[in-house]
Image (cartoon, rainbow, N blue to C red):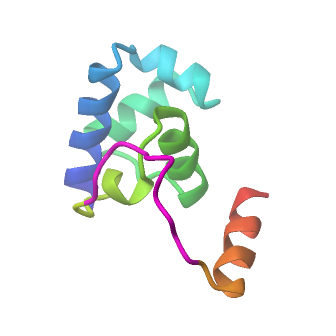
Amino acid sequence: YMVIFRKRLKEIRKKRMLTQSQLGEKVFLSKGEICAYEKGNRIPPLDVLIRIANFLEIDFLWLIGMELEHKKSNNKIVNLSSDDIKIIKLIRK
């Protein structure tokens, strides 16, 4: 998934007209970390993927190569199990 992730991260960052430094500042990472992710030199942990995706308002699954719509929509209905909700709460902590 790293090849797709690094390409999509760079693509969406540029589309939002952000530098690596600006994106890093917004998601509490250094410019070097963003650069390493875009070059494929480092693999971000799940919490970082989610933080980046949330800031960019995209689905983190799209970032890692899942073919999903890459814009969030407020009118989507998603049914989550109680286990799903527990996992999401743990990830957000």
Q: Look at 39% across and 15% down and name the residue there.
A: 18
Badge count: 0
Can you name the residue that lies furthest to the front here?
Answer: 75
Indicate yes or no whether the magenta region holds residue 56: no
Residue 47 left/right relative to 33: right
Residue 82 picture location, percent across and down: 72, 85
Q: Look at 49% across and 23% down and name the residue there.
A: 23
Which image quadrant for residue 29?
A: top right
The residue closer to the viewer here, 44 or 26, is 26
Is residue 92 depicted above or below 22 in this figure?
below
Give the residues drawn in magenta, as a range.
68-79
Q: Look at 25% across and 41% down and name the residue there.
A: 8
Residue 31 picture location, percent across and down: 48, 22
Residue 17 left/right relative to 8: right
The residue closer to the viewer here, 37 or 80, is 80
| Magenta stretch prevailing secondary structure | loop
Which image quadrant for residue 27?
A: top right
Q: Look at 34% across and 13% down and name the residue there.
A: 17
Indicate yes or no whether the magenta region holds residue 69: yes
Instruction: Name the image quarter holding the N terminus.
Output: bottom left
Is residue 3 depicted above or below 56 in this figure?
below
Residue 24 left/right relative to 87: left
The residue closer to the viewer here, 45 or 8, is 8
Is residue 14 depicted above or below 41 in this figure?
above
Is residue 9 depicted above or below 49 in this figure?
above
Residue 60 picture location, percent across and down: 43, 54
Instruction: Name the image quarter holding the C terminus.
Output: bottom right
